[in-house]
Image: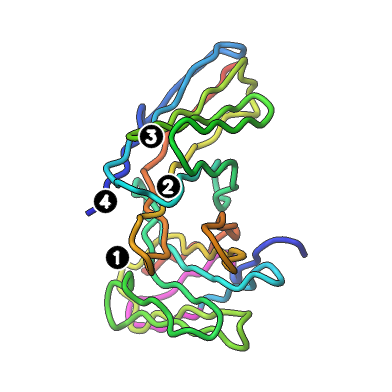
Amino acid sequence: GAGVSQSPSNKVTEKGKDVELRCDPISGHTALYWYRQSLGQGLEFLIYFQGNSAPDKSGLPSDRFSAERTGGSVSTLTIQRTQQEDSAVYLCASSLETSGVRAQYFGPGTRLLVL
Amino acid sequence: EDQVTQSPEALRLQEGESSSLNCSYTVSGLRGLFWYRQDPGKGPEFLFTLYSAGEEKEKERLKATLTKKESFLHITAPKPEDSATYLCAVRPPAEGANNLFFGTGTRLTVIP
């Protein structure tokens, strides 16, 4: 596939459970981003990975949120002890960030509902 | 905090009725302004990047322009398939600031 893929597309969980969201970036893209989109809100930056550099975690809302990127490709966003306010669409994006400022290309998102 | 404001929040147009969407920002020395289109239930789709005041980009019925404080997305003779939410985002000037700051979007409806 040519685009960013995410799984699952929908996730319903109970409050207090842990969830894992997966992102497959565009092949060859070195930069990967996670954003969150809540109803009526703009996209909120969560975390950024670039190559082998330490990730920029400045957007993570609490220590219940973590992410990793294995082998410079696939990324997993983990939310521990989910709360109802975590319900949102989680979007992953990738870009070819070798130099300059490049456009970010988004996946379809994972819709998370915490009951 | 950097601010991106989009207006109007919602816009209804008759098919063929041209109009403009506005994105104003308070970032100085931004490193890029981006327009995206988002359809319901989907991720944002990249449209344009603008880097400096005076720059213009065009794609089909869409034309994006940039000044020092705002950007416009002009839609000429829109069709129903142009109905979507249009998002504006800016890349702040600080080196190491890698994320985009998004506005809340303009929801465009084009009526046949």
Look at discs 2 and 1 and give the one toward the viewer: 2
Corner quadrant of residue A3 = bottom right
Q: Dot 1 lies on which element?
A: helix
- The range drawn in magenta is A9-20
**Is residue B82 visible to the viewer in this orientation of the structure?**
yes
* Residue B2, numbered label: 4
Between A112 and B24, the one lying in front of the other is: B24
Corner quadrant of residue B98 = bottom left
Q: Residues within 10 Å of mark 2 (few under 14, many from 20)?
A: many
Residue holding disc 3? B23
Q: Chain of mark 1?
A: A
Of callouts 2 and 4, the N-terminal one? 4
Q: CA distance from mark 2 to mark 1?
A: 24 Å
* Residue B89, numbered label: 2
Q: Are marks 3 and 4 in contact (CB under 8 Å)?
A: no
Please give the name of the residue rendered at 33% of the width and 61% of the height, measured from the top-left corner: B94
Give residue B46's position: percent from left, percent from top: 59, 47
